Image (spheres, rainbow, N blue to C red):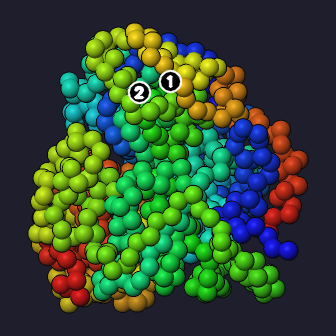
């Protein structure tokens, strides 16, 4: 599935300082029944965002109009649990392009990169600074530069670099996905398979 | 000339790398691919829109499990969305020539139960599925892990995914387990020590006497939950127990092919002197029956203990409070005696025959507690048949329980098996996340023995008192 290229993203951010946000919260299982990839954003954080009668929960951050932007800032161990890519789809579909945390669960990180969401892992100290900056000014902007691999709090100029492997970086900057690449390796793969004991 | 000592994980991983990309992931070959109705439809749509085919349809197996009802499976599925996903799985499988064990097929069941049961899962394989508990298959000395839907599409179209090689961790549990201590307790204990993120970035090998003496069913329970400590997967070196389990199963190698496979499988162990990035050691004597009190699998405790305080747990106090609040528990509470409304035995963690034998060992001669609703859900039709053949069904019926039909059921509550909001469930599944078993459901993870003890007493009970 093609996704938007990612280079430099300047945006305000939505803070969610909760640890261990698991993919069952991001998109509860009962919303996984679609056979197409669309509309998942409507159910992003469904049970934290809405009451049983579908009225919005006023104290949940996505229902608070003072916060907005294309960056979601989460607590430690973001995206743990189920391998459902639907969690990443929901985040993308809602309008986020980048998730920042001090620690990501593996599968979530992989899924995000595969669909064009940039997971930015920062130090716990820097994560704290981001939360403080947003607390001081809900419209505080962050700048995420993929080419430079840096994230900056624009109000204070504080900056940290983040890791991403060269291959994934190239893909994200160009909106490429792995399937195209793997197709180009077909001959090698077939030769490999011919020697496999299974 | 001696070779550099290698770990079991290295041996299997390195032999599956088609190509290494500099400053990037490995192009990683997949021997077996399982698909189910929930995470595959979008992958097939992707294939279609790109005009791609399934490269090796014989390496992919489809089963319906996540969405399926656990009663009246012979009737049309009521929920139109679920029915639609089941239909998509069936038609996609037919279109691309993939074998499909749909609802009603005698081989149908939970993907991680039917793979091993039919000899599809073998030592030294690489196995993936769009379900994080694919780690279960690591019990056979395979590298097995969950993938996302984009990766499902990659495997279908190229039999490969792009994976950076994880780091290596070994977890040793030495000594002998006490009476009433099951593999589920062992793994819940490890996760409570390591936390739910303690093995993120690692692939785990479980080693030591406790695992050597464990049955295949037990090893599957342990590897199943390796994902709950954040690990990419977990594995156990194959041994005589493994080979005996596989031998004679439908898709297992036979005759000369068996001998050849066996010779290879015997090389699949960590060499003396091979090193791990991290190693943890635990003593079996420290493990008691476990139960979780919070909303992630790392929040587990010995059943006779008090709920650990926020300070003892560490991490963010706000997250701890949120978790206990959701559960309706308090710091330092005693778990024994807490009321239980629902009991669920099943799932790919504890839905195998050994689990039902354990459950029945406590139920036998007792009665279901009146206020408890119990969902007893075999992992597959084969398990269901064994339950009947071994007389376990009679024990269940005499005690006032009903047996349901196979599927994931209340493990993720995508079908009708949802625990109502605010109710307490002792569950043998793998996740106690908020709402996992239904919106507002309060889950306590535990072994089949703890589940059985709760089912007959109606409260959290130390199963050792009933053995
Ligand atoms: S039983 Fe639960 S964990 Fe296992 S495959 Fe089904 S939903 Fe996933």
Measuring from the top left, give residue B352's x and y in whole percent. 44, 75
Q: Is residue B308 left or right of residue A8?
A: left
Mark 1 on the same chain as mark 2 = yes
Q: What residue do we see at 11% from left, 60% from top?
A: B333
Q: Earlier in the sequence, mark 1 or mark 2?
A: 2
The residue indicated by pointer 2 is: A126
Query: Looking at the picture, does residue A89 appear above or below residue B271?
Result: above
Mark yes or no: residue B89 visible: no
* Residue B4 location (% of width, % of height): 76, 67
Distance of mark 1 from mark 2, alpha carbons? 7 Å
Please identify the quadrant where the C terminus of chain B is shown. bottom left
Q: Nearer the viewer, residue B429 or B378?
A: B429
Provide the residue designation for mark 1.
A160
Closest to the observer: A134 or B411? A134
Residue B283 makes an appearance in the image = yes
Q: Nearer the viewer, residue B334 or B343?
A: B334
Dot 2 crowding, Cα within 10 Å, few <14, some 14–19, many 20+: some
Indicate left or right for A122 with B463 as reference: right
Residue plotted at (79% across, 70% down): B3
Q: Secondary structure at mark 2?
A: helix
Q: Position of residue B142 (x, y in %)?
A: 63, 67
The quarter of the rendering in which ligand 1 is drawn is bottom left
Residue ID at (27%, 48%) = B314
How far across and down, in percent of the image, does residue B20 sit?
78, 46
In the rendering, which numbered label is found on residue B99? Answer: none
């Amino acid at each position: 599935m093609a996704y938007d290229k990612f280079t430099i993203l300047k945006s305000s951010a939505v803070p969610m300082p909760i640890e261990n946000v698991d993919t069952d919260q991001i998109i509860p299982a009962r919303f996984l029944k679609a056979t197409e990839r669309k509309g998942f954003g409507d159910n992003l954080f469904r049970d934290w965002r809405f009451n049983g009668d579908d009225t919005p929960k006023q104290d949940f951050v996505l229902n608070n109009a003072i916060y907005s932007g294309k960056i979601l800032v989460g607590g430690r161990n973001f995206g743990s649990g189920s391998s459902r890519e639907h969690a990443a789809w929901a985040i993308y579909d809602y309008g986020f392009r980048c998730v920042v945390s001090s620690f990501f669960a593996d599968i979530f990180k992989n899924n995000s990169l595969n669909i064009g969401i940039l997971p930015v892992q920062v130090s716990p100290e820097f994560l704290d600074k981001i939360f403080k900056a947003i607390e001081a000014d809900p419209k505080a902007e962050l700048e995420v530069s993929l080419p430079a691999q840096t994230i900056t709090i624009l109000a204070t100029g504080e900056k940290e670099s983040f890791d991403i492997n060269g291959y994934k970086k190239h893909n994200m900057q160009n909106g490429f996905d792995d399937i195209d690449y793997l197709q180009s390796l077909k001959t090698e793969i077939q030769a490999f398979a011919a020697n496999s004991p299974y | 000339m001696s070779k550099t000592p290698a770990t079991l994980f290295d041996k299997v991983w390195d032999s599956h790398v088609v190509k290494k990309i500099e400053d990037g992931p490995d192009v990683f070959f997949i021997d077996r691919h399982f698909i189910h109705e929930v995470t595959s439809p979008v992958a097939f749509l992707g294939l279609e829109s790109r005009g791609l085919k399934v490269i090796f349809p014989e390496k992919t197996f489809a089963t319906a499990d996540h969405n399926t009802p656990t009663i009246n499976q012979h009737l049309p599925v009521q929920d139109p969305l679920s029915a639609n996903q089941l239909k998509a799985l069936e038609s996609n499988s037919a279109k691309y020539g993939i074998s499909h064990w749909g609802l009603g097929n005698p081989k149908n069941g939970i993907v991680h139960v039917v793979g091993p049961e039919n000899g599809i899962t073998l030592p030294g394989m690489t196995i993936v599925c769009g379900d994080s508990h694919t780690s279960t298959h690591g019990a056979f000395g395979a590298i097995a892990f969950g993938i996302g839907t984009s990766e499902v599409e990659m495997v279908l179209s190229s039999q490969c995914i792009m994976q950076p090689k994880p780091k290596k961790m070994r977890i040793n549990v030495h000594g002998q387990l006490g009476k009433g201590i099951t593999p589920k307790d062992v793994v819940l204990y490890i996760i409570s020590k390591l936390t739910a993120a303690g093995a993120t970035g690692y692939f785990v090998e479980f080693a030591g006497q406790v695992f050597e003496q464990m049955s295949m069913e037990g090893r599957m329970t342990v590897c199943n939950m390796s994902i709950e400590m954040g690990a990419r997967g977990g594995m156990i070196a194959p041994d005589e127990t493994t080979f005996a389990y596989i031998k004679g199963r439908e898709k297992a190698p036979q005759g000369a092919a068996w001998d050849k496979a066996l010779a290879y499988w015997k090389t699949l162990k960590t060499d003396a002197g091979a090193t791990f990035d991290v190693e943890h050691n635990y003593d079996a004597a420290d493990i008691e029956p476990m139960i979780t009190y919070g909303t992630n699998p790392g929040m587990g405790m010995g059943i006779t203990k008090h709920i650990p305080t926020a300070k003892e747990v560490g991490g963010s106090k706000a997250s701890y409070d949120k978790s206990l609040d959701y559960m309706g528990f308090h710091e330092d509470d005693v778990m024994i005696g807490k009321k239980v409304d629902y009991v669920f035995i099943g799932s790919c963690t504890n839905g195998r025959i050994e689990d039902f034998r354990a459950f029945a060992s406590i139920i036998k001669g007792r009665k279901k507690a009146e206020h408890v609703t119990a969902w007893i859900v075999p992992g597959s039709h084969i398990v269901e048949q064994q339950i009947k053949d071994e007389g376990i069904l009679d024990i269940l019926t005499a005690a006032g329980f009903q047996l349901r039909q196979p599927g994931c059921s209340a493990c993720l509550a995508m079908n009708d098996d949802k625990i109502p909001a605010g109710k307490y469930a002792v569950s043998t599944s793998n996740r106690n996340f908020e709402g996992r078993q239904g919106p507002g459901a309060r889950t306590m993870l535990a072994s089949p023995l703890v589940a059985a003890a709760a089912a007959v007493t109606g409260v959290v009970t130390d199963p050792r008192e009933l053995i």
